[in-house]
Structures are given as structure tokens and as C-alpha cells.
Amino acid sequence: MTLLERIDRRVGVPLTLSIIVVVATVVGSLGPPSLDRVVLGALLNLVFVVGLYLFVGNSGIMSFGHLAFAAVGAYAAGLFAMSEQSKRNLVPDAPEWLISTSMGSIAAVLVAGLVAALVALLVVVPLSRISGLAAGIATVSLLIATRVIAGNWESITRGKKSLADIPITTTRERALLWLVVLIFVAWGYQRSRWGRQLRASKVDEVAAASVGISVPFQRGASFVLSAFFTGVGGGLFALSLGSVGPDIFYLDLTFLVIAMLVVGGVDTLSGAVLGTVGVSILAEIMRRIEGGNFIGLFDVPARPGIQRVVVGAVLLLVLLRRPRGMVGDREISFFSPRRRTTPVSTPAKPNQQPTLEETSDV
């Protein structure tokens, strides 16, 4: 086996995707200053999408309410990163231990992920035992409940007034570093024994259970891991914006994140990353056209609402022409462009059960 083959087998895909993201970030940073915020927003969207992919891509169950964990992470990071004086002014009725506890931005982001994972642990038992449309509806109810709680828990979140005075510490470099770590973690989990077992249940849940795979446990583990990184993304978002409100992580952003994942391809990590990059570029172009400006080069007539219309049309077109996304079932690697996802991602033959070899480590 050559060196390139060894690299491709172990880290070829995440290394390729990381290079693409780094190059895209560098190119974006060379543009006008107005693009700085756009590039940072695209990186944060990538964190949300790859975090969602950790669960959806491996389990085959669509989660429409995953940004509830981003909201939890955003409030947690904001509260722990704020100074004690700011919390005494804004949330004086919060518990004393919360008011007196302040930490650096890195620690606050990690706590945000842990709090989101803890919330996921509280709801994972019932959610891991249902699938299909029922699971999707259940996750939507989680998103709605989170928004209602955030909008009414005034002693902690300030309700609809929004939690402000959060220190702004998230930079492009910091968001990029977290994203690269997440890409490698997602690839490692996907190729691990647990990831392969979960993908086996994605093909045939009954057959996977018949060979000893605990489907609810594997779904639950993936759900909690995904919630952790989605919470990290929420924490980074809060520390980039400086304030958090109950409506930020709701239907608009949920639709955009799901569109990014579906356009690229739900079954592959490459689809999650490339779909997000493509939709982010398209959404930014449409946003500028909405405002009567095109990349700062010339003015065009304003077209309010065109961004949602175009993104929705692209999503519909992809679903009609390429139901498995633009990437399909192939991972992208500079070292081996013909790589497929995993053996268990292909449809199983009737009455055929996953073998122990398919659910073990490579």
C-alpha cells in the first residue's frame, strides 16, 4: 500500500474537506471588508450542518429541531462568558452561583457543548426509540419547546428582551479551527465501530438488531455527540454576535441548515460540507440582490424575498433531479476520487443481514 493510499484510507476525506474549507475562507478574507461577516457566518453554518450530519447522516433519521441545542449552547456560552457585573445588571434574579461564575471564551464554548449534550441526554431515551416521520415531528416539538422556554424564562434568558452584553470573541480563525476539529471527529465516528453499526441500522433496522446491534443505544450516542457539537456551534454564534434572542435559532435558520445538508447529500460528510459552501455562496449572492447590490460591483433593482425563493427552488430541483444530493453516496478525496462512503450505505438485498465484517472497524 502506497503512502497516498494510506493517507486516503485514514484521513483522506477529512483532510480534503479541511483544505477546501481553509482555501474558501482565505479567498473570502481577500475580498472587501463586508465579506468578513459573511465568511464567519458561513463557517458557523458549517458547524451546524456537520453537527447535524453526525446524527442524520449516520442514522438516516431527519432531525428538524436540532438547532434547539444550538440555542441551549448559545445561552450557556453567553451566560458563562459574561462578566459578573453584566449578569447582575441584566439577570439579577439568576442563581448566585451562575452570576458569580465567569470564564474565558474557550471554556464557555466547551460548557455550551456539555450543557447541550446534557439536554440531549434528558430527551434521548424516547427519541431514540422512534424513527421516520414520528421522530421528525418529535424533534420539531423540541425546537418549539426550547423557543417557548427561552422566550419566557426571564430570570435566566431575559425572555424576549434578548441576552446582551456578551463579549465578542469568535473570530474566523477560531471558528475555522473548531470546524476542522469537527470534520475529523465526524469522519472518525463515521468510520468507527459505533458509526458502522448505526449505518447498518440505517439500511435495515431489523436485520441490524438481529445480529446484536442495540439500535436505540447507537442512535442515542450519535444524538448526544451531535448535540454537543451543535451546542458548540451555538456558543460560537453567541460569542460572534454579542447577544442571543429566542427567535435566532428557529425556523429560518433551521430551513437553511437542512437545505444545505440536503443539497449536498445527507449520506456523506463531503455532501454536508460542499452543500453548505455552495448554498452559502448562493444565499449571499441572493441577499445582495435583495438589497439592490451585487457583490459591491454594481447596483441592481431590489428584489425582496428572492433569497428564500431561490434557495427553496434549488432545494426542490435537487430533490427532483438528484434525491441523494449533489455528491450522492461518494466521499470526495484528492487522493482517491472514486471513494464511496461505507459498504453498509448501499441498499441491502432482500432478507440479507449485515455481516459482522460490515459492522466492525476497518
Image (spheres, rainbow, N blue to C red):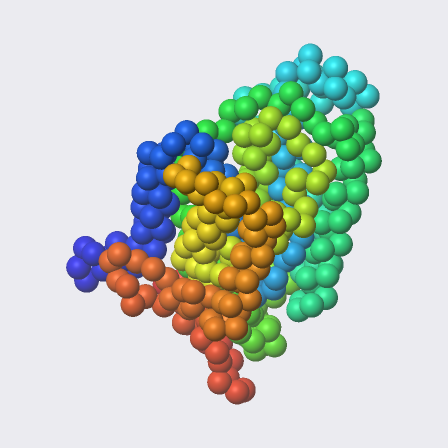
Q: Is residue 218 visible?
A: no
Residue nearest the viewer, comparing 343 with 255: 255
Is residue 201 rendered to the left or right of residue 357? right
Task: Name the residue at 61% across, 77% down.
Answer: 206
Is residue 156 rendered to the left or right of residue 291? right
Q: Position of residue 236 (x, y in %)?
A: 54, 34
Q: Based on the displayed image, in which of its 4 quarters is residue 311 positioned?
A: bottom right
Name the image quarter holding the N terminus: bottom left
Q: Position of residue 273 (x, y in %)?
A: 43, 52
Task: Name the residue at 58% across, 21% down.
Answer: 167
Task: Name the residue at 73% across, 59% down.
Answer: 138
Name the image quarter holding the C terminus: bottom left
> Please, is residue 2 above or below residue 91 in the view?
below
Q: Position of residue 215 (x, y in %)?
A: 61, 66
> Please, is residue 136 above or below residue 144 in the view?
below
Question: Quick one: which residue is furthest to the left in this view?
Answer: 2
Task: Name the residue at 31% across, 46% down.
Answer: 19
Question: Quick one: which residue is furthest to the top in this view?
Answer: 85
Q: How many marks?
A: 0
Q: Is residue 162 visible?
A: yes
Q: Position of residue 337 (x, y in %)?
A: 28, 63
Residue nearest the viewer, comparing 47 with 264: 264
Is residue 81 rendered to the left or right of residue 92? left
